[in-house]
Amino acid sequence: MKIFDYRAANSVAEAIAAAGPGSAFLAAGTEVVPALRDGLLHPDRLIDLLPLGLDGIERRDDGLRLGGLARLSDIASHPEVLASAPALASAIEQSGTAAIRSMGTLAGNLLQQVRCPYYRGAAPCNRRAPGSGCSVARGDQRHAALMPLSFHCAAVHPSDPAVALASLDATIVVEGRAGRRTLSLDQLYPAAGAVLGVPSVLESGDLIIALDLPAGRLPGRYAKIRDRSSFDFALVSAAGGLRLEGGVVVEAALALGGIAWKPWRCRRAEAMLVGRPWSADLVRQAVAAELSGATPLEGTRFKVELAIRAAATVLDPGGPS
Ligand SMILES: Cc1cc2nc3c(=O)[nH]c(=O)nc-3n(C[C@H](O)[C@H](O)[C@H](O)COP(=O)(O)OP(=O)(O)OC[C@H]3O[C@@H](n4cnc5c(N)ncnc54)[C@H](O)[C@@H]3O)c2cc1C
């Protein structure tokens, strides 16, 4: 392992000032420490954020503010989250293990690297070693994307909470060298075809301070389909909900996970649902239309049907609340 400098940050300004080329932020380290050990990360300097706190969960007039360094387990068990964003609580409860949830932070979860076996293995991977090739084309495609970032990388974003946050219209508060700015979940992740290697568009010195959940959103549900129920990353997941009036859909929110390099907010499906009488067929058609632009590999074709079924679970008005 490369020798690096370690600094504990005592203020946000200090953390940002200490960051630079070759530095990395450290929260609970459940992602960073294995990456150091496995030679995926070679920082000159690690800047420890935990002394900053930034872990509160606070009701505001316009919604709920979650500290960027809030522990996943504290979010999932918080009464305000359970009441207004059960989809998020459920997504967290289905993430990792109890030990990971009680250590891991929300910002760290959103910024985790892909779980593609080739990124974390020795076979060619454009994300780990740009230009070396992508082993997914001739390899294990089960966990690959239906909507790849680009020809060079077919890995999916592994976060469960991100999918729920996308369905809840969460915004991310970032403090950086140029001051404070807010991003949508969609803006946090690279645009299709973007440069490989990094999971988000954040630059050195950009610190996630908080996430805001606007008031009045559909609380929603979360469905995760995975190979192993003890703990595993999603093959496909869905977050969202519906509001009906007289059997007609008047509001819909849907995001899918496990299908792309970012949580996939299904605007097209939502538009097809609103204004029509709810039926299981309508949901199926809407999600199929959303996925009509997908470019599945031979080994990911099954995910189209899986995504439709996951979405049907959260968009079933008769389902568990
Ligand atoms: C065995 C295992 C199983 C898992 N299963 C799941 C799962 O099923 N579903 C799921 O969603 N996740 C899963 N995870 C991921 C887990 O939730 C994350 O590892 C954890 O949330 C990361 O938080 P952390 O505080 O440890 O981040 P760290 O490891 O400290 O940091 C992760 C990244 O975020 C950056 N970072 C951290 N905080 C900030 C900040 N405030 N501002 C800017 N950058 C920051 C770091 O620089 C680093 O790049 C699993 C992890 C493990 C190890």
Image (spheres, grey):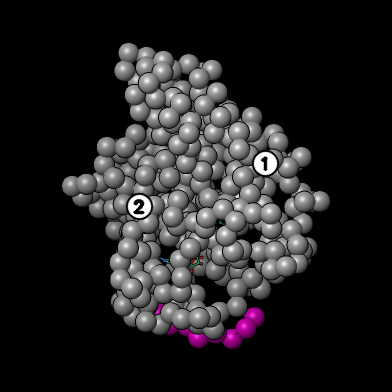
Q: Gap between marks 2 and 1, in whole Å?
A: 29 Å
Give the residue drawn at x 37%, y 44%.
Answer: 169
* Residue 6 highlighted magenta (yes or no): yes
Give the residue drawn at x 57%, y 60%.
Answer: 194
Q: Few, some or many C-alpha atoms within 10 Å of disc 2 (few <14, some 14-19, many ≥20)?
A: many
Mark 2 — residue? Answer: 171
Element type at marker 1?
Answer: loop
Q: Which mark is residue 295?
A: 1
Q: Quadrant of residue 127?
A: bottom right
User: In which quadrant will I find the N terminus?
Assistant: bottom right
The amino acid type of the residue labelled 2 equals: Thr
Image coordinates for residue 297, horizontal then vertical, percent: 73, 42
* Residue 82 can be seen, yes or no: no
Image coordinates for residue 174, horizontal then vertical, percent: 35, 64
Magenta region, residue range: 1-8
Q: Which mark is residue 209?
A: none
Give the residue drawn at x 60%, y 56%.
Answer: 193
Would residue 209 appear left or right of 150 to someone viewing this image?
Answer: left
Image coordinates for residue 266, horizontal then vertical, percent: 48, 37
